[in-house]
């Protein structure tokens, strides 16, 4: 595509609709919006716009559509697939000032919010009303709810409560030509035409800009129990996951952590809360939640019966809130810890739960075959493992030319297990070359036609997914 560079005339137009100080062209803000949490990519935009209303977003998009100026919607910049990278320059639409929770509807168990609200702040706001928003990505303390919509985020408690797509009722969106529509209805059931709401979720800002979000809420659980279960075998830890479900138990979280991930994480945060036995190869972090503690203890007892069939070490029961916080801290910083230890690539594979042992085994085979190191952890309860590939001593040549072959083999194997190449991080900029590994051309062509229908001038987040 041939895109127009932003001119002084264009800047004057943006300034005319934005209050002073909300069109940014200084080096600090351009660099802030030039990257996200994806590896070390940097693509500097020409300008950064910070709208505060749907009308401002509409005017900006209408103008850019006519002028063929690329526009990249940006949330908090916590993405891991390069979804917010302005690879063609142009304008970054920084949504951080659209940060109002508009309405918490206690009677209908709904919340209406703008996209720039930090996810954890939204969770806390509804919790104060006795309600519960369950999707809690590891970056919930910094990521925006709008970014969660763009990526169809999950998190630790998706195993029981589902991912973002399971919580969204309706979206107000601005199309690339500036038109504003609502995608659905504020109802629990809706069988009226094509489901545009679900189409927008996970579309990574390539089809429209989300300006309002209606989410369904639940009654807040009041009790939770957490245990840490060490295993002598990583494959056995994965095998135990589907056995727990086959026995009739659905934890609120069921996380897998390879020993290397635990060690790196504890070193990163400067604590040694977990004293692992020498033979420990991996662990599961298991949480159950609800309203009756007695029932939760019975649930854990049933899970412990299942675990008797495996070689486990001493199970740690987190009997204090402080212990729970420490355990969750170790898990939630694993991504950051892995990234500080080496140049890295993070793959977001997901397979049917019962296939997790096969996936782990394949990763270890690829490590030996291609000579890389990895750190593995993730949401085992829904089959989603994050495989952090570390460069460490691998040569630059192998990292550049050989590693992509390993990743492609991993993805093809994942697909053969009935899985796919991203569970919650999205395709974005870094994974698009692997789409052909899992989709036939007809499937890709259909997706490209959808993109063309929404965005005929290809101005919205270009260079992503395809």
Image (cartoon, rainbow, N blue to C red):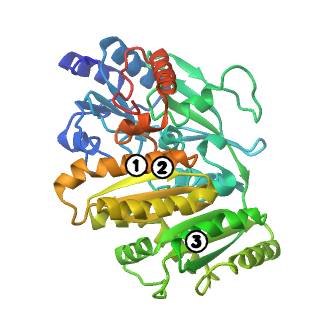
> From the image, which quarter does the C terminus lie in?
top left
**Secondary element at tag 2:** helix
Residue depicted at 75% across the width and 33% down the height: 187
Q: Is residue 67 left or right of residue 448?
A: left
- Residue 210 percent coordinates (x, y): 51, 31
- For marks 1 and 3, the one nearer the N-term is 3
- Residue 387 percent coordinates (x, y): 42, 58
Q: Which mark is residue 409?
A: 1
Q: CB under 8 Å between callouts 1 and 3?
A: no
- For marks 2 and 3, the one nearer the N-term is 3
Closer-to-camera residue (150/112): 150
**Secondary element at tag 3:** helix
Bin the neighbour count of mark 2 within 10 Å (Cα to Cα): few under 14, some 14-19, many 20 and up.
Answer: many
Whether 199 is drawn above or below 242: the answer is: above
Q: Which residue is mark 2?
A: 413
- Residue 323 percent coordinates (x, y): 56, 80
Query: Can residue 37 be seen from the camera position used here?
Result: no
Q: Which residue is mark 3?
A: 237
């Amino acid at each position: 595509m041939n895109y127009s560079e932003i001119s002084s005339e264009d800047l004057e137009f943006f300034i005319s609709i934005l209050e002073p100080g909300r069109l940014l062209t200084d080096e600090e803000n351009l660099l802030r919006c030039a990257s996200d949490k994806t590896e070390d990519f940097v693509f500097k935009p020409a300008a950064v716009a910070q709208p505060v209303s749907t009308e401002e977003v509409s005017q900006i998009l209408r103008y850019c559509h006519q002028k063929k100026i690329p526009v990249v919607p940006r949330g908090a910049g916590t993405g891991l697939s390069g979804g917010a990278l302005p690879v063609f320059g142009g304008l970054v639409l920084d949504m951080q000032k659209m940060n109002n929770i508009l309405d918490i509807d206690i009677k209908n168990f709904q919340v209406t919010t703008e996209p720039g609200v930090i996810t954890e702040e939204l969770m806390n706001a509804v919790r104060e009303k006795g309600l519960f928003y369950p999707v809690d990505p590891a970056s919930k303390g910094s990521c925006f709810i709008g970014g969660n919509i763009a990526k169809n985020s999950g998190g630790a408690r998706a195993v029981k409560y589902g991912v973002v797509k399971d919580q969204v009722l309706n979206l107000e969106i601005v199309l690339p030509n500036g038109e504003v529509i609502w995608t659905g209805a504020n109802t629990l059931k809706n069988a009226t035409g094509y489901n545009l709401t679900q189409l927008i979720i996970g579309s990574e800002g390539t089809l429209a800009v989300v300006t309002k979000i209606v989410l369904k809420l639940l009654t807040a659980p009041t009790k939770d129990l957490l245990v840490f279960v060490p295993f002598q075998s990583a494959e056995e830890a994965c095998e135990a996951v589907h056995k727990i479900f086959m026995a009739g138990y659905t934890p609120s979280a069921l996380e897998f952590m390879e020993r290397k991930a635990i060690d790196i994480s504890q070193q990163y945060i400067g604590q040694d809360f977990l004293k692992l036995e020498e033979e420990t190869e991996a662990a599961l972090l298991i949480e159950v939640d609800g309203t009756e503690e007695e029932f939760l203890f019975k649930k854990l007892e049933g899970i412990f019966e299942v675990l008797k069939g495996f070689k486990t070490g001493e199970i740690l029961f987190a009997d204090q809130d402080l212990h729970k916080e420490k355990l969750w801290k170790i898990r939630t910083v694993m991504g950051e810890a892995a990234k500080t230890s080496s140049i890295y690539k993070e793959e977001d594979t997901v397979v049917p739960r019962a296939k997790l042992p096969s996936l782990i085994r394949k990763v270890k085979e690829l490590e030996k075959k291609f000579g890389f190191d990895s750190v593995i952890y993730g949401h085992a309860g829904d089959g989603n493992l994050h495989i952090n590939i570390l460069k460490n001593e691998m040569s630059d040549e192998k990292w550049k030319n050989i590693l992509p072959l390993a990743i492609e083999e991993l993805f093809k194997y994942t697909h053969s297990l009935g899985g796919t190449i991203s569970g919650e991080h999205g395709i974005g900029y870094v994974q698009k070359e692997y789409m052909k590994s899992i989709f036939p051309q007809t499937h890709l062509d259909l997706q490209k036609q959808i993109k063309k229908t929404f965005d005929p001038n290809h101005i919205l987040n270009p260079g992503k997914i395809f």
